[in-house]
Image (cartoon, rainbow, N blue to C red):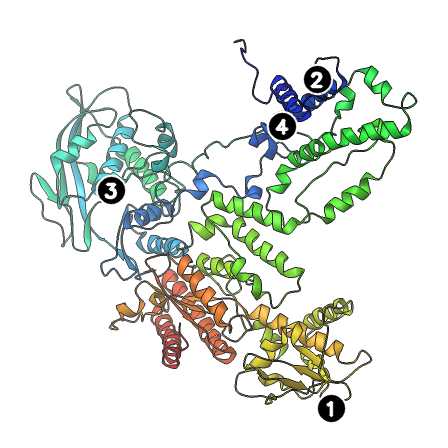
Amino acid sequence: MPRRREDPELGFADLRRRGIGNAQSLSGEIWTDYNHHDPGVTLLEALCFALTGSVFGAEARIADLLTAPDGRIHYRRHGMHRAEEALPCRPATRWDLTRYLLDRVPALRHARVDMPERDGVWRLALRAPAGLGDALAAEAARAFWSARNLAEDLAMPPGMLAPRWCALRLSLGIGGGRDLTDILAELVERCDALIGMAPPRHPPHSRLSRLGDRDGQEDSDALFDGPVTHNDWITDEDLRREPAPRLHFADLARELESIEGVDAIDRLALVPLGEDAPDADESGIDWQGEGWALQLRWPDTPADIASWTVVRRGSRLTLDAAALLEQLADRRNIGKTPGAAMASAVSAPLGRPSGQYMAPSRYLSFWHHLPPLYQLAHAPPAASAGMAAQFGGYLILLEQWLAHGDAQLAHLRELFSLTAQAQRSYWWEPLDDRHLPILGPNSSEARERALRAADEALERRGRVLDFLLALHGEGCGQNSLQRFGHYFSPRDWPAHLFECKRQFLLRIVRHTRDRSAGFDYSRPSLGRKSNTAPLAERIALLLGFTHAHSRRLNARLEAIGCAVSETRGPEPGEVPPSDLRPLMLWVPARERIAALYAEDVRVGRVAARLAHYFAGLDLAALPGPLLRCAVHEDRYRRLAGADTPLWLGPDENGRWWPLDVRVGRAGVRSPAMYLHAFACDIQREAEGVHLVEPVLLRPLADGTEPDRAGYAHRILLVFPGWTARTADPSFRDLARETVAESCPAHILPQIYWPDAGDLARFERSYAAWLDARQVYCAALTHGRAVDAAITGHDRHAADLLRLFGEWDAAGERS
């Protein structure tokens, strides 16, 4: 062990030297004895010894500080993810998509993927084993739908390259002790793969083994390049290799001679079969053409292998036709199983740091490190109670912050977590007689309660989330949102913003890497949190919406039995009475009204209670300006002894709303609080965003020419335009800025702000189109009633396009 020649920085000797230097500079001529026997030096040394423990804790491994009592680091609780989860990208290029489809549908031989019109519509041409074309085409379509990107679609149905059959004729010599049947079976299988242009697949561990090799071609960046694969890996070179138009028999024989047991191939030929057989001669055969590809017909009768000759050491061998045909059938059936993995299972994850759990312990005061003489001299009975308390006070001044620091370090795991409970961000350990016997009993609990009251947990935990987001190169700035907390109490609004930021971080990979992903339209999406476009979720969370998933925004209004109108309803007054008095809504009785409203929502009694309180309001045409004004608690006024004792105003147009209220024992306060709770609830529940992709609305029927310029690389975002926030021009500016910053650069977003009536009309059409799209996908994958499904889809898509056209004409777009 090498000997340390110098004291470590911030070690005991270094801290003692710094402490004495500071004492000398501060005390001047007052304190001149700095030897070991001096009481001040003794206290300083005890303090330095205690400080070394805090320095040691600060230098602890982060992995140890994050390790939970079960001995594991729960990475997701801290907003961290495996490299193999976060770094691979979505299928973006044609090669990414090819690799992805071959991985998800292993039985496919190959796939040609292209976007010839550059309009977001991919076209597939698949090579599949005989008899599995329809099944694998359906499986490939489902794989694409689950991984497609925004503003992209698949031209249906996927094309199948028509097989042009050929039969194998050969004469070869073998050697070694390998069984003849095994050699010939592998030769047929390898020949079929080479003719079918199936790219070679490599085990996942082969890529991991090449990391760090000087001669290896893989580095950590290349390892995570492209989409994540569940089965074997296909290299970029193999994916991009384009086969020649003609296959030469000599090249094929050279590849097959690498099979174990094959000494030489004396003759090899592929004989065309059928009327549309490809051209062939003695040297080769046409390999592929427009809409077709060469495919080997496996031997399935003894006549198919009767012409084969096999020689070992000059002697011709007799083929066991039955055994060979049986093994070929087994190999062919294994390769035909749809969805079966070609080789290994999911690749083993890369290692992650692990740590040792550090159990929290009580702070040990350096009182216990003082010489016994010092302890006796400063404790009763040698010292008076006042002197002992004074000495204890000095120690607390020196040590209390050390104890708090140790407590904070022990709970670092809780601070940097994504738990929904943000009740504290500081941890303390107030010193008492358990730490310093000379203190005597005191109320450390009272001091901890006082410390907790000063802990602005939400603000500090929010900054922790900002730090964790920054590790992913992201941010969730909410300063611009602070003034839009219309539907929340002053206490609930910061908690809601914290929850939005927490939800953003919980699914950070989805909101960053996957923000260009589209939803899977072959499955239900409205009301399903698991099938919403990540971009829509991201925008909703950044704008502080209560719900981020795709859903019907008018559902709460419709469930209550109300509707909002911008044109119908009572006319507001222009000039309010001069003796109006402010009405306070945030009073203790507010909790009772909030519980009453929640119960009414549960049992469906909201409309009846509103009709009871406000007989003059038409619930089928609630005025939009009135509802937007009603969410502001500072705009309620009361007028004593009048027919209209409750007034609201001013609204966005500067007008006032007199309301005829049924007055109870509490006057107009209870109806006013109920109206406020109702207005906040329906507008909070109505806020969200619908993301529509025009490429999915293009007509699918044969003979229709879509408007590519109208749907290529575009998305339409539909926000409700009637709520207190979304009707505010400042909030709309913020929404436009958020959309522009979040949307992928190659996609043009267009935003619409319909009123409640137009939004209800849109949601009915949109839901009908989504249902028609699912019916269309089911018809394609099951191969029945496709024409009827296309007709229904195109009809509902046309309804949506017509509605957007009307909004464009009316200027609803921004």
Residue 126 x/y as whole percent: 27, 52
Q: Earlier in the sequence, mark 4 or mark 2?
A: 2
Q: Position of residue 755 (x, y in %)?
A: 49, 78
The amino acid sitting under disc 4 is Gly
Give the labeled residue for mark 2.
32
- 412 to the left or right of 732: right
Name which quarter of the figure residue 184 lies in: top left
* Residue, disc 3: 298
**Position above or below: 735 against 517:** below
- Residue type, numbered disc 2: Thr
Nearer to the camera, 359 or 188: 359
Q: Could you say whether the residue bearing mark 3 is in a helix, strand or loop?
A: loop
Tell me the element at label 2.
loop
Tell me if label 4 and label 2 are in contact, CB under 8 Å. Answer: no
For residue 10, which quarter of the picture? top right
Q: Which residue is mark 4?
A: 57
Mark 4 or 2: in front is 2
590, above or below 495, in the image = below
Query: Is disc 4 surrounded by few (<14), some (14 to 19) or many (20+) residues within 10 Å?
Result: some
Q: Is the C terminus in the top left, top right, bottom left or bottom right quadrant? A: bottom left
The amino acid type, in three-letter code, at marker 3 is Trp
- Sequence-wise, the earlier of marks 1 and 2 is 2
Whether residues under marks 3 and 1 lie with C-beta atoms below 8 angstroms apart, the answer is no
Q: CA distance from mark 4 to mark 3?
A: 70 Å
Instruction: From the image, state whether disc 1 or disc 2 is nearer to you.
Output: 2
* Residue type at the position of mark 1: Asp
Of circles 4 and 3, the one toward us is 4
Which residue does the numbered mark 1 point to in the structure image? 643
